[in-house]
Image: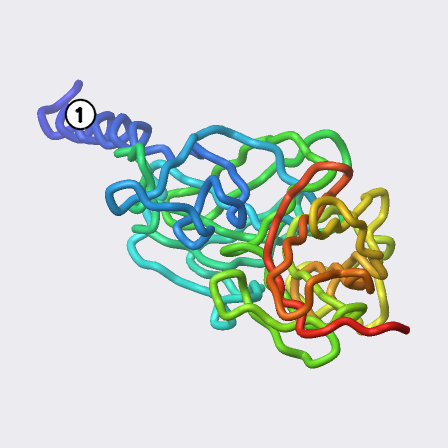
Amino acid sequence: MVTLKTSLALFFAMSFGAFAQSQTCSVVDVDNAANDNFTPFAGRVPVTGKWQKTYGIRPVASGEVAAVLINNSGLVSNQYSSAMLWPTTATLGMTVTVNGEPAPMYEVTATKYLYLTPALKAVDGMVIFQVPFQITGATATLEFVGGNCDVSVTVPVAQNAPGFYGGPLIQDVSSGAINGPNSPLIGVNGYGYIAIYGYGLGQLTSAVPAGVPAPMAANPLQGTSVTLAVDGGQPAEVLYAGIAPGSIGQYEVIAQVPSSTAPEFAYHQAFLFVNGTQVAGFNYWVEFSYCR
């Protein structure tokens, strides 16, 4: 015999179940967090105070800083890596794994998506993390656990996905001066050395655990070609392209400025290519040229 109490209990249980099902967490966007298509800190021109965004599920690559938008995440606060520039292995309210391997986190936010346009009203969370360096295979499974979420999505794997927060971070190797493209430009001596820092350049010769400082020994890229051209195509010799020794998650490209760079005391342009595709451009200042 079904009593009124039993009927009400069944009704509320079914209603709650339907509500819970309607609130299922889902991934609605996977993108490169350090390129010009996604984040407010990627150097794009805002449109009415927001940043243009094309949504979709995109490939990921070794060492990439990826950003994921989540529907019904249950996130209620923003949490960030204490180092900001480098990721953390600490839990920031949500854990992420890539093919079962923990991914170091940059931030887990409940509001940052509001800066994007067109807006996705259902989206209530953003997760930014670094893809482990040595992922293999044609696809990768990303899993998100925390808040309302215990959800996974399978995405294609690309050979590389270069990205630069606000543009390349540039250093004059000789003096140690460092800056981004929005800061006063560094002075580089003709035939001096320049270093460029970024993310997502691809697999390394030797495996490096994600989220911890890289060994100080050189560890170049494997299967990826990196070139640098200055002043309309003049090649700059790339001396090293790989993980930045001692860094957490950063890649480093070291190149030598051609001795024929002219004029002195002037701005010059440089363009970075990965596997033949231009991925970044920046200006640098030549103080003076000299011969070897």
**Rendered image coloring scheme:** rainbow
85, 232: nearer the viewer:
232
Residue that label 1 marks: 11
Residue drawn at (13%, 28%), measured in percent from left and top? 8
Q: What's the residue at 39%, 50% (across, down)? A: 40
**Image position of 13 with respect to 73: above or below:** above
Above or below — where is 122 with respect to 212? above
Q: What residue is rendered at 65% in x and 66% in y?
A: 248
In this rendering, the count of numbered labels is 1
Q: Residue 39: image x %, image y %? A: 43, 48
Pinpoint residue 72: horizontal percent, then vertical percent: 33, 38
Seen at 72% across and 61% down, the residue is: 262
Rendered view: 287 above or below 221: below
Quarter of the figure that contains the C terminus? bottom right
Amino acid carrying mark 1 in the image: Phe
Residue 145 image offset from top left, x and y in percent:
48, 47
Q: Nearer the viewer, residue 194 or 148?
A: 194
Farthest-out residue, top: 1
| Relative image position of residue 35 (x, y in whole percent) | 53, 45
Identify the residue at the far front of this view.
263
- Which quarter of the picture shows residue 260? bottom right
Say what secondary structure mark 1 lies in: helix
Residue sitting farthest toward the bottom: 175
Q: Quadrant of the N terminus?
A: top left
In the image, residue 141 above or below residue 203: above
Drawn side of residue 40 relative to residue 281, left or right? left
Within-10-Å neighbours for mark 1: few <14, some 14–19, many 20+: few
Front-lying residue, 41 or 134: 41
